[in-house]
Image (spheres, coloured by chain):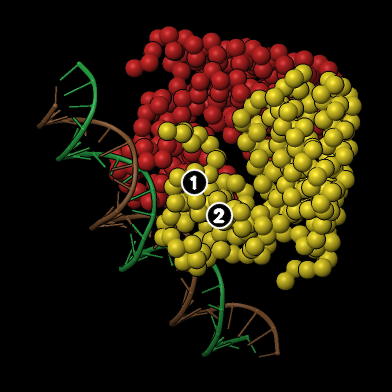
Chain colours: A yellow, B red, C brown, D green
DNA sequence: CGAATCAAGATTGTTCAACAATATATTTTA
DNA sequence: TAAAATATATTGTTGAACAATCTTGATTCG
């Protein structure tokens, strides 16, 4: 009997399962940015009742993946520049907290090491899709240094939003390539307990990553203006 | 047409209104800690349908005020020691971020000043209930220094959880009294741009506050053991 | 022609009743 | 007494229905 405290979507219930499926479709970019999700249609597509679907919608809205306008319905969120900037502000605060919380021999390091290695292999294979996921997993693991379920949950939230943003970009191609090495450098600094180097590397990563996303975002805006 | 992006409960919809009412009752301690909330009964009490109530429950679950166990129902969350410790870990990370983000003449300072003043008056009147609320509002305002809606949202989440914990304590009497002056000191350090003093004062506040809550919590456990 | 008005039409908001699936309580049996 | 079986209550989910609100398109008027 697992307790569902917070935001882990429960596959147990149908509503939860539907929420998970929709979330994966959102992250995979299978909906148009800003698209309206009709209760009738989506309920029919997933073969569930409207009431059940509405529960799933509520869940995804609380995850900031869908936006909800009373009496008008539910829409696919399109993270704009302000959202990206804010997301990276959250990341900076939380991940700096992780640097300060880092203690020698913390179990999170093991996972980070595995992920760095995996990242290298994926990079060699030019599988940029998976490199992106791997990169996020690495930073998720890093936040694990805080040993704080709530900080991890908050971090997961902005990360999911970031994935949504990625999914909406056309060619995020090798947007993540440069970070394979940066992550390695960061991990080494963390493991040796060098706070200053860790902070510097982290800040460099965040700045570069944010710029990359903002750039790609602007590129899209230019290609596909307001309709 | 206000967009409901995130977690602001929408009074617009009935489900949202019910969620807000239940949340206020939770924070006011009008439910037993750990109490099960029957869908039938609560739906009848609030004169809404089960489906609508379930939407409200989902919302409050995402707020970590209710816990949800599939096929068993929804229960009033009882923050334990681990939760309190984690909450203060989140507070430390976010509020330290606020200290670093603090910039001269930031609008948040105005509000903080008002709240410090109000806190003094409430303290003089021995209205400890409102002193508690005022204290939380002060720190909420402080997080506003980050200018990050998402950090504020995360902070609101843990603060709501903390209020739930307070509501479950019998005599939180003047648990908040010492902080009236500490908040003033903190504000002064922030406004003068003295990062070091700000950090020191913040850490002192968080440590003291956490101890106070943990102590009160242990006191309750002793008085009312597991049934 | 353009803007405001008004009436369909569609969508969301909410309820209700029903039934299946699961958990809880009670009784029976060993 | 302990385990098993039954009965009862609760949650999970559905479908239909109707009210409230939004959207659309035609109509009218300036």
Please tell me which residue lies in front, A209 or A47: A47
- Spot occupied by residue A222 in the image (x, y as percentages of width and height): 83, 66
> Is residue A42 left or right of B195 when viewed as pictured?
left
**Direction from residue B185 to residue A58 in the image, left or right:** left
Residue occupied by mark 1:
A11
Q: In the rendered structure, find residue A106 and report the number of the disc placed on it.
A: none
Residue that carries the numbered disc 2 in the rendered image: A21
SS class of the residue under badge 1?
A: loop
Q: Residue A208 location, x and y as percent?
A: 87, 44
At 77% from the left edge and 15% from the top edge, which residue is drawn? B200
Look at the numbered discs 1 and 2 and tell me whether their residues touch, using CB distance below 8 Å: no
Please rate how many residues cluster around mark 1, counting C-alpha atoms within 10 Å: few if below 14, some from 14 to 19, many from 20. Answer: some
x, y (%) of residue A22? Answer: 57, 56
Q: Chain of mark 2?
A: A
Image location of residue B134, percent across then percent down? 60, 25
Residue at 72%, 22% in the rendered image: A106
- Considering depth in this image, is B76 or A107 the residue closer to the camera? A107
């Amino acid at each position: 009997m697992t307790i569902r405290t917070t935001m882990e979507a429960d596959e147990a219930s149908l509503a939860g399962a539907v929420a998970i499926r929709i979330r994966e479709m959102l992250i995979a970019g299978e909906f148009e940015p800003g698209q309206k999700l009709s209760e009738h249609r989506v309920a029919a597509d997933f073969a569930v009742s409207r009431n059940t679907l509405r529960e799933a919608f509520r869940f995804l809205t609380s995850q900031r993946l869908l936006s909800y306008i009373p009496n008008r319905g539910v829409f696919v969120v399109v993270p704009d520049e302000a959202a990206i900037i804010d997301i990276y502000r959250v990341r900076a605060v939380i991940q700096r907290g992780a640097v300060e919380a880092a203690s020698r021999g913390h179990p999170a390091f093991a996972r980070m090491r595995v992920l760095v290695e995996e990242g290298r292999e994926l990079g060699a294979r030019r599988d940029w899709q998976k490199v992106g996921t791997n990169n996020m997993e690495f930073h998720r693991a890093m936040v694990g240094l805080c040993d704080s379920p709530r900080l991890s949950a908050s971090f997961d939230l902005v990360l999911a939003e970031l994935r949504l943003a990625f999914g909406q970009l056309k060619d995020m191609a090798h947007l993540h390539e440069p970070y394979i090495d940066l992550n390695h450098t960061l991990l080494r600094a963390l493991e040796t307990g060098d706070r200053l180097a860790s902070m510097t590397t982290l800040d460099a990563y965040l700045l570069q990553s944010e710029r990359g996303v903002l750039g790609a975002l602007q590129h899209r805006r230019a290609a596909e203006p307001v309709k």
